[in-house]
Image (cartoon, grey):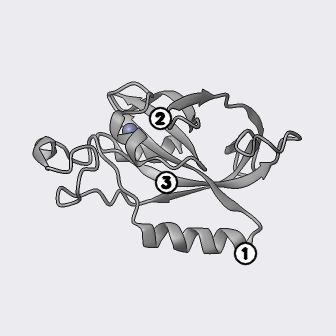
Amino acid sequence: MTAAAVAAYPQECCGLILGQRELSCDRSQPEDDDRQVLDIVPVANAWEPSLLDYTDPTGKAQAGHGQRDRYWIDPAVMLAVQKSARQQQLEIIGIYHSHPDHPAVPSACDRTLAWPVYSYVILSVQLGTVADLTSWRLDPQHLFQPEPVKIIGTSANNTPFLS
Ligand SMILES: [Zn+2]
C-alpha cells in the first residue's frame, strides 16, 4: 500500500483491501466487526474530469480537480476483484487511497462516495514519503469515525498484516 502511494505521487493511488471479517458477539452491531487484512489489490485511479463530481452535480467545482485530489475505482474492476477474492474465501473489506501533500483525513468527497460496509484507509504522502496511515468507517449518521489499525504479523514477503 505504501509502495503504491509513493509510486503514484503526486497523483492519488487507490486500491482494494481484501481480508476477512470476524463478526462481533453482539449481532445487533453488525458493522462493529474486526477486520483482518490479508491481501491488497492496487487498481488504476480511473478518475477523469468528465466523471460527475457527486459533491457538486452542477460541475462548477470540477475546475482544478484531477488525479492529484480525486480517485475513482471502475465498478467493473471492483466486481472482478470481488469475484476472484471469493474464490480464495476472501472479500473486499476496504478501499485505500492516498492524499498527496494532504493529511490522512477523509474529504467531503470521500464521505459522499463512501459505502457503510467498507473500511477506508487513507495514506498521507508528504513530498513523496508516506507520513501517516489512518482508517475510517461510516457510522449510522454517514459520518466517518476513525478505527484503530494494528500490525499483527507479516506475510512471506514481509508485508505487514493490518487489522
Ligand atoms: Zn480522499
Q: What kind of element bears circle 1?
A: helix
Residue that protrudes farthest toward the right in the picture: 25
User: In what quadrant of the picture does the C terminus appear?
Assistant: top right
Front residue of 75/156: it is 75
From this view, report whether residue 99 is shown above or below residue 62. above
| Type of the residue with mark 3 | Gly
How far apart are the two marked residues, 2 and 3, measured between alpha carbons?
12 Å
Q: Earlier in the sequence, mark 2 or mark 1?
A: 1
From this view, report whether residue 106 is shown above or below residue 52. above
Mark 1 Cβ and ligand 1 under 8 Å apart:
no
Residue sitting at x 77%, y 67%? 89
**Coordinates of residue 115 in the picture (x, y in percent):** 51, 50
How far apart are the two marked residues, 1 and 3, measured between alpha carbons?
19 Å
How far apart are the two marked residues, 2 and 1, measured between alpha carbons?
28 Å
Q: Earlier in the sequence, mark 2 or mark 3?
A: 3
Tally of numbered tags: 3
Residue sitting at x 71%, y 54%? 19
Q: What kind of element bears circle 3?
A: strand
Q: Quadrant of ligand 1?
A: top left
Q: Residues within 10 Å of mark 1 (few under 14, many from 20)?
A: few
Residue sitting at x 36%, y 33%? 107
**Coordinates of residue 82 in the picture (x, y in percent):** 60, 68
Residue sitting at x 75%, y 49%? 155
Q: Residues within 10 Å of mark 2 (few under 14, many from 20)?
A: many
In the picture of the structure, the residue carrying the numbered disc 3 is 15
In the picture of the structure, the residue carrying the numbered disc 1 is 87
**Coordinates of residue 11 in the picture (x, y in percent):** 30, 44
In the picture of the structure, the residue carrying the numbered disc 2 is 123
| Type of the residue with mark 1 | Gln
